Image: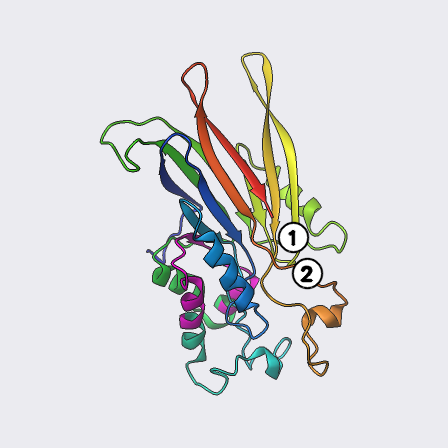
Amino acid sequence: MSLLSIPRGHVVNVYLKPGEVKHLTLTSDLHTEDPMCDLQGLSKMFEARQKLAHHSAISIGDLTTLIGHNDTARFRPPVANPLWATKEAWVDEAIAYTVEHMTKHGTKWDMVSPGNHEDEWLKRHNTDVTTRIADRLGCPRGGYSGFVDYRLIMSNTGGPSGKKDKHTRVRVLYHHGAWGGKANKGYTGARDFANQRDDWQIFAYGHNHHCRLDPETRIKMKNGKENEYPVYLVNCSSWQKSYTEDARVTTYAERRGFPRAIRKAPLVRMWFEIDKNRVIQPHYTVEV
């Protein structure tokens, strides 16, 4: 992977037989190496998802927390994982630990991208942790925002046939997130960002650690007709606990008076159908 130029978009080819479904897990704000990460819940979720056909996942930022001692504005001792709190190369330990838990159940990763925590670490230390994690996972490194096109290719063999097969596409647009709000959970800012882009089916965002799903309708105008199609705006939640059991430890969420956030990983289902004109048509749903 070149460090000089990282594309904004990526394409994932998915070979499906008629009637088969592609499953995609959307994740954000895993904070995997953080002591407050719900590793048990995360593990159970990935174990269950791996039983689904054609399953893979993407992460749209804050895979890690990475708050060091020299970050005087945010550091306090409970932030440091006791497994490596006294080690010089603790960032290397954190990266290895993160990759270990992301691959524990054999999950295939289609893309990982940075969040504000990785971006802050890059700004302070000139080290691209996201690229290092992506290299170990064997997947592309995305941008702070971008898109992943899932190309659903009809195949009776489950693989390339050597000829031009019928295919369609489901586009997952994403941004790590920059929008909060206790009531709307970032929806209004996310909607404004997504509405600048055309021709997407799913918009994933995160950052505020909340979960929200908004199915909406868009209109595509063609041949004098208005054709409706569904889109989904998805706040991808987090796997970091909001409050500790030990009342002596004050978390960021508690200090700011944030409500506890549920820990979820939205699930996308994609498939295709052949219409009466023998045209392949995409179908997709999102659930949380």
Residue 113 lies in the magenta-colored region: yes
Q: Residue at x 46, y 58 (%)?
A: 47
Q: Does residue 212 appear anywhere in the picture?
A: yes
Residue 144 lies in the magenta-colored region: no
What distance separates the C-alpha of mark 1 from that of mark 2? Answer: 8 Å
Quarter holding the N terminus is bottom left
Q: Does residue 31 appear anywhere in the picture?
A: no
Amino acid type assigned to the residue bearing label 2 in the image: Ala
Label 2 Cα crowd, 10 Å radius (few <14 / some 14-19 / many 20+): some
Label 1 Cα crowd, 10 Å radius (few <14 / some 14-19 / many 20+): many
* Residue farthest to the bottom, as pictured: 86
Q: Nearer the viewer, residue 184 or 123?
A: 184
Numbered label attached to residue 211: 1
Q: Which residues are magenta?
A: 96-121
- Where is 14 relative to 65, above or below? above
Question: In the image, residue 235 lies at what x, y percent?
Answer: 62, 50
Badges 1 and 2: C-beta atoms under 8 Å apart? Answer: yes
Q: Secondary structure at mark 1?
A: strand
Q: Residue at x 31, y 27 (%)?
A: 165
Q: Residue at x 66, y 48 (%)?
A: 212
The answer to whether residue 118 is left or right of residue 178 is left
Numbered label attached to residue 261: 2
Task: Tell me which colouring the rendered structure shows.
Answer: rainbow
Question: In the image, residue 17 lies at what x, y percent?
Answer: 36, 33
The answer to whether residue 73 is left or right of residue 21 is right
Question: In the image, residue 241 lies at what x, y percent?
Answer: 63, 68
- Where is 278 relative to 135, above or below? above
- N-terminal-most mark, 1 or 2: 1
Q: Secondary structure at mark 2?
A: loop
